[in-house]
Amino acid sequence: MATIRELRKRLGLPVDALAHKAGVSTRHIVLWEKYGLSPRSRATVEKIARALGVEPDELLPNAENTEGVSDA
């Protein structure tokens, strides 16, 4: 399982570019990366995975059962 940060850096994407591409806030990307937390909703995981060009299960295999920073 790769982390959001690892995948983002492989693509050479700045945090704000990933956030924009995925339709989530830059703040949430920073929190998820900094604390190693996972997005709470499967929909958010799917948006981030799509933006990174990976399958959601590759990004976070247990995304539906993870605890993390709220997506709100």
Image (cartoon, rainbow, N blue to C red):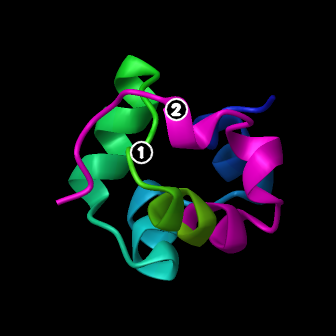
Label 2 SS: helix
Q: Is residue 34 above or below residue 25?
A: above
Q: At 34% across and 69% down in the image, what residue appears?
A: 24
Whole-percent x and y of residue 20? 41, 78
The answer to whether residue 38 is left or right of residue 62 is left
Q: At 29% across and 59% down in the image, what residue appears?
A: 26
In magenta, the rendered stretch is 48-72
Q: Residues within 10 Å of mark 2 (few under 14, many from 20)?
A: few
The answer to whether residue 33 is left or right of residue 9 is left
Q: Is residue 41 above or below residue 70?
A: below
Magenta span has 8?
Answer: no
Magenta span has 50?
Answer: yes
- Please identify the quadrant where the N terminus is shown: top right
Whole-percent x and y of residue 50? 70, 72
Q: At 30% across and 35% down in the image, what residue appears?
A: 31
Q: Which residue is mark 1?
A: 39
Q: At 70% across and 57% down in the image, what residue appears?
A: 12
Q: Is residue 68 above or below residue 47?
A: above
> Label 2 sits on what residue type?
Asn
Tags 1 and 2 in contact by the CB under 8 Å rule? Answer: no
**Residue most extreme to the left:** 72
> Label 1 sits on what residue type?
Pro
Q: Which residue is mark 2?
A: 65
Whole-percent x and y of residue 62? 66, 33
The answer to whether residue 27 is left or right of residue 24 is left
